Image (cartoon, rainbow, N blue to C red):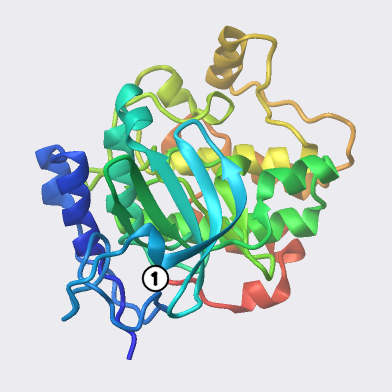
Amino acid sequence: MQQALKPSNAVKAAIQVLGKPPQANAKSRQQEEQGDQKTLRQDGGQSAGTSDGNASRQWTINDFEIGKPLGKGKFGNVYLAREKQSKFVVALKVLFKSQLQHSNVEHQLRREIEIQAHLRHPNILRLYGFFYDKEKVYLILEYAARGELYKELVASSHFDERTSASYILSLARALHYCHTKHVIHRDIKPENLLVGLNGELKISDFGWSVHAPSNRRKTLCGTLDYLPPEMVEGKEHSTTVDNWSLGVLTYEFLFGGPPFEAPDHQDTYKRIVRVDLRFPNTPEVSAEAKAFIRKLLVKDASRRLPLPEVENDPWIRANADPELLKSQPLK
């Protein structure tokens, strides 16, 4: 019988290899979600990021057959991989410790491990576990066969309303799930979304996320085009920053670019703060879609469309995949 990978062990091991997190974050971690997800190994080994077991063997790179590269980043690369014993296919994210330390982003990796290991949702990329050696940290991730959503968006220049509405509904449900776990993503954008084999959306990259039971933060982070007014102005922000990002993303899906784009950063900041929202004449987009975007891109964060109400919006009801609309959101 396969044993599930326990995030609690991943968190403990992350602290050992990356350093102790701030006390507030350590206290705020929630109990892990129960789940019967498919696992990587029969014996469940005792090691960083895996479940407790009788075996003393630890994960090493020799446990995996390494395939083609899936992507490259500043701190390392992602490879298609297969665990030798179970033949289970994963994405193996290989990060260089020296690069992480040089850029002083160990805390972001630790945060990513702590948060993502606790989340169980069909539209959130699964972190199965991790291991490390003297030079590298290896994250064992769910493999999203169709890759980055951004590449699909660039290839098609923009999505039609049916595709956009289906993606946005899936994303709204996943973000609401995160918020119920006191997790704010804070960096939703096409580059951080992956697509599974059957076209399902997967949120990835939780490096900017924060576990914030107090629901209020004051750190400037995320991607410029997706920043809400309260973050640009240096004010406290809450889970509704993700609601704003959902509105920006809807706009980019439908029109092929972000709504507040400007020649330089200062002009972009000004447009965001004013909520200077303009809709181009092409491509042609329905009035209902524009109304949906306006409900999310509101300066007063408390007046943004709540995520649970997204699926009842007329535009979503008219355009999202009927099977998706029938399914119940995961709570």
Question: In the image, is 10 to the left or to the right of 324?
Answer: left
Question: In the image, is 103 to the left or to the right of 317?
Answer: left
Question: Percent x, y for residue 218?
Answer: 30, 27
| Residue ID at (65%, 21%) | 276
Q: Secondary structure at mark 1?
A: loop
Relative to the observer, which residue lies in front, 257 or 231? 257
Q: Say whether residue 309 is visible.
A: no
Q: Which residue is mark 1?
A: 331
**Amino acid type at image mark 1:** Lys
Q: Say whether residue 5 is visible.
A: yes
| Residue ID at (49%, 30%) | 74
Question: Percent x, y for residue 151?
Answer: 72, 44
Relative to the observer, which residue lies in front, 140 or 148? 140
Question: Percent x, y for residue 199?
Answer: 69, 65
Relative to the observer, which residue lies in front, 118 or 171? 118
Residue 35 placement: quadrant? bottom left
In the rendered view, tell whether residue 216 sits above or below residue 263.
below
Spot the residue most to the bottom.
Answer: 1
Residue 97 placement: quadrant? top left
| Residue ID at (77%, 36%) | 256
Question: In the image, is 66 to the left or to the right of 117?
Answer: right
In the rendered view, tell whether residue 210 sits above or below residue 314.
above
In the rendered view, tell whether residue 147 sits above or below residue 293.
below
Q: Residues within 10 Å of mark 1 (few under 14, many from 20)?
A: few
Question: Percent x, y for residue 39?
Answer: 39, 77
User: How many numbered dots are placed on residues in this image?
Assistant: 1
Relative to the observer, which residue lies in front, 188 or 300? 188
| Residue ID at (41%, 46%) | 206
- Which quarter of the figure is the C terminus placed in? bottom left
Spot the residue most to the front.
Answer: 62
